[in-house]
Amino acid sequence: MSHGNIDPDTKASRVEAFLSSTEFVNAIIHDDGLAAKQHLAAGRPIYYGDDRYPEGVIKKYPDGHRQLVIVTPDGEISVIQDL
């Protein structure tokens, strides 16, 4: 079976299991920011949460400008405001 044909409920269960795994939690706790820096250096934006903006996530571009965005369940990104 290809990954594109995974039952949505099965896929959701796998995602939930991953997000609650010890490995994921440890990776978040001990994150040194290296992957984010590498993405920015390669010209790709990064996304991160900020408690000051609970209504969305921050999209930071390689040039340093930031936007507050929301991401729909189907992956569509909408800009709320420039920061």
Image: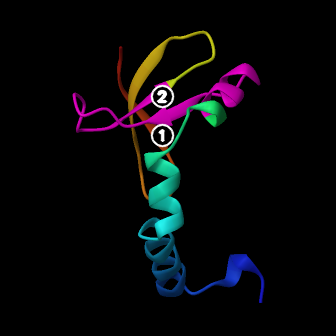
In depth, the one of 12 and 74 nearer the eye is 12
Residue 75 part of the magenta segment: no
Q: Which residue is mark 2?
A: 59
What x and y, as percent, mark residue 41? 72, 20
Relative to 62, does residue 58 appear above or below in the rendering? below
What x and y, as percent, mark residue 52? 22, 28
Mark 2 residue type = Lys
What x and y, as percent, mark residue 33? 56, 32
Dot in front, 1 or 2: 2
Relative to 23, does residue 72 appear above or below in the rendering? above
Asked which quadrant contains residue 71, the reply is top left
The stretch in magenta equals 36-59
Where, quadrant-wise, is the N terminus in this rendering?
Answer: bottom right
Tag of residue 77: 1
Mark 1 residue type = Ile
What residue do we see at 63% from left, 84% from top? 6
What x and y, as percent, mark residue 56? 32, 38
Secondary structure under the numbered disc 2 in the rendered image: strand
Colour mapping used in the image: rainbow
For this view, does 63 lie left or right of residue 53?
Answer: right
What residue do we see at 24% from left, 38% from top? 55
What residue do we see at 47% from left, 68% from top? 22
What residue do we see at 54% from left, 11% from top? 64
- The answer to whether the residue labelled 1 contacts the one labelled 2, judged by CB atoms less than 8 Å apart, is yes
For this view, does 4 lie left or right of residue 67?
Answer: right
Callout 2: 10 Å neighbours few (<14), some, many (20+)?
many
